[in-house]
Image: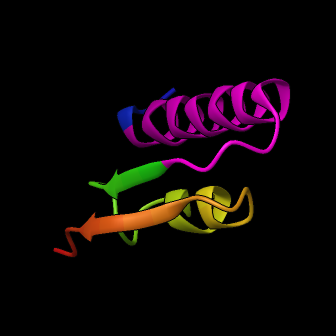
Amino acid sequence: MSKIYLFFLLNAVIIFCIIFYFVIMGDRMYKFIDLFAGIGGFRLAFESLNCECVFSIYP
Protein backbone atom coordinates (compact mmCIF):
# COMPACT_ATOMS: atom_id res chain seq x y z
CA MET A 1 0.00 0.00 0.00
CA SER A 2 1.12 3.51 -0.60
CA LYS A 3 1.90 5.92 2.21
CA ILE A 4 -1.23 8.02 1.60
CA TYR A 5 -3.51 5.00 2.12
CA LEU A 6 -1.70 4.11 5.32
CA PHE A 7 -2.08 7.70 6.51
CA PHE A 8 -5.85 7.68 5.94
CA LEU A 9 -6.19 4.24 7.51
CA LEU A 10 -4.32 5.42 10.60
CA ASN A 11 -6.47 8.55 10.68
CA ALA A 12 -9.66 6.47 10.60
CA VAL A 13 -8.40 4.17 13.37
CA ILE A 14 -7.51 7.13 15.58
CA ILE A 15 -10.94 8.72 15.07
CA PHE A 16 -12.66 5.41 15.84
CA CYS A 17 -10.65 4.99 19.06
CA ILE A 18 -11.39 8.54 20.17
CA ILE A 19 -15.13 8.17 19.51
CA PHE A 20 -15.18 4.81 21.30
CA TYR A 21 -13.41 6.38 24.29
CA PHE A 22 -15.92 9.24 24.52
CA VAL A 23 -18.88 6.86 24.27
CA ILE A 24 -17.50 4.88 27.20
CA MET A 25 -16.74 8.01 29.25
CA GLY A 26 -20.32 9.28 29.00
CA ASP A 27 -21.55 12.88 28.76
CA ARG A 28 -18.49 14.68 30.10
CA MET A 29 -17.63 17.93 28.34
CA TYR A 30 -14.15 18.01 26.82
CA LYS A 31 -12.18 20.69 25.03
CA PHE A 32 -9.87 19.82 22.15
CA ILE A 33 -7.34 21.34 19.77
CA ASP A 34 -7.87 20.55 16.08
CA LEU A 35 -4.34 20.08 14.73
CA PHE A 36 -5.55 18.18 11.66
CA ALA A 37 -8.08 20.69 10.33
CA GLY A 38 -9.27 19.80 6.84
CA ILE A 39 -7.69 16.34 6.75
CA GLY A 40 -10.10 13.83 8.22
CA GLY A 41 -13.05 15.32 10.03
CA PHE A 42 -11.63 15.35 13.55
CA ARG A 43 -13.62 18.45 14.41
CA LEU A 44 -16.91 16.96 13.19
CA ALA A 45 -16.31 13.80 15.19
CA PHE A 46 -15.54 15.68 18.39
CA GLU A 47 -18.34 18.21 18.01
CA SER A 48 -20.84 15.39 17.48
CA LEU A 49 -19.78 14.22 20.96
CA ASN A 50 -20.53 17.68 22.48
CA CYS A 51 -16.87 18.67 22.77
CA GLU A 52 -15.62 22.23 22.32
CA CYS A 53 -12.86 23.20 19.88
CA VAL A 54 -10.61 25.80 21.53
CA PHE A 55 -7.96 26.10 18.78
CA SER A 56 -7.75 25.08 15.13
CA ILE A 57 -4.90 25.01 12.64
CA TYR A 58 -5.87 25.16 8.99
CA PRO A 59 -3.06 24.80 6.43
Percent across and percent down for residue 37 are 35, 67
Q: Quadrant of residue 44?
A: bottom right
Q: Main secondary structure of the magenta part?
A: helix
In the rendered view, tell whether residue 8 sits above or below residue 34.
above
Residue 34 falls within the magenta-colored stretch: no
Percent across and percent down for residue 30 are 53, 47
In this rendering, would 46 be left or right of 57? Answer: right
Q: Foreground residue, 12 or 23?
A: 23
Q: Residue at x 40, y 51 (%)?
A: 32
Q: Quadrant of residue 17?
A: top right
Query: Start and end of the magenta stretch?
Result: 4-30
Q: Residue at x 24, y 66 (%)?
A: 55
In this rendering, would 57 be left or right of 30? Answer: left
Give the quarter of the figure containing the C terminus. Answer: bottom left
Residue 12 falls within the magenta-colored stretch: yes
Percent across and percent down for residue 47 are 63, 66
In the rendered view, tell whether residue 21 sits above or below residue 37.
above
